Image (cartoon, grey):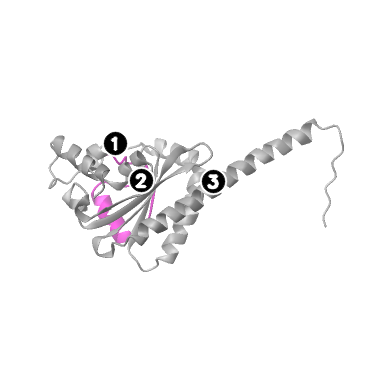
Amino acid sequence: MPDFVKASRRQCSNAGMDPAEVRVPSQRMTEAELLAKRNEYYEILEVVSFFSDKVLQSLAGTPILIVISDEKGYILDIVGDETIKDMIQKLGIEAGVRFTQEDLGTNVISLALQQRHPVNLIGDDHFFEFLHGTACYSAPFHYTDLDNLLGSISIMTSLELENSLFLNMLSNVVDSIERELLLRKQNRKLDILNQIMLKRTQNAIIVTDA
């Protein structure tokens, strides 16, 4: 178990948390706040959702859930297996809630955002017992040119399906997401520069087909 996971579990114990307790997130966006955040993240969610769908297609038949959060741990989208989705919704985990160590103990979303690298928690790596039957994997993603944290993408499945390849796959997906986001950002800058040049030039510009 990595030192940062041990440290997180110690912090939960020192805070007097009971591992047998079933915790629910206490921080939640309003519907209006969630809608505003999703609108702000529209392009990011579009890119992440494209690659999430690819993962789900490649693992068709495997019960997994993909969770997308912003940089503060607020859940923006949950897709995948309906049985797992129903289970976590009963625990109050749905779009708009915030994952924190204070509410959900040692968890992959909080750790991935804090550590800024891929993290996995298998079974009793989680602090709370109600998560001991799960295997969870998470990776943060950024705008790589600025190195600013945008959020995380996570995979949740049953403990019986635990596989280290999930974390490798997630890391590769995040690389693809970051390249696509950077490409779109660079294309927007080029488009703005082209518009400025077209508006300011006194020369005629003629564009032809082949």
Q: Quadrant of residue 21?
A: top left
Q: In this image, 109 relative to 51: left or right? A: left
> Which residue is more in the foreground, 99 or 162?
162
Residue lying farthest to the bottom in this orientation: 61
Q: From this viewpoint, is residue 174 visible? A: yes
Which of the two residues, 28 or 10, is positioned nearer the viewer here?
Answer: 10
Among numbered discs 1 and 2, the one appearing first in the sequence: 1
Residue receiving disc 1: 27
Direction from residue 3 to residue 22 in the image, left or right: left
Percent x, y of residue 125 = 22, 51
Residue at the (68%, 40%) spot, across then down: 191
Q: Quadrant of residue 172?
A: bottom left
Vertical relation: 43 (above or below) 148: below
* Residue, disc 3: 181
Which element carries disc 2, helix, strand or loop? loop
The answer to whether residue 12 is magenta is: no
Q: Is residue 87 left or right of residue 78?
A: left
Which comes before the other along the chain, label 3 or label 2? 2
Q: Residue at x 12, y 48 (%)?
A: 20
The foreground one among 61 and 95 is 61
Between disc 3 and disc 1, whose residue precedes? 1
Highlighted range, magenta: 75-100
Query: What numbered label is drawn on residue 95?
Result: 2
Amino acid at circle 1: Gln
Give how far apart the Cα atoms at labels 1 and 2 are.
11 Å
Type of the residue with mark 2 = Ala
Residue at 42%, 53% in the rendered image = 171
Q: CA distance from mark 3 to mark 1?
A: 29 Å
Secondary structure type for disc 3: helix
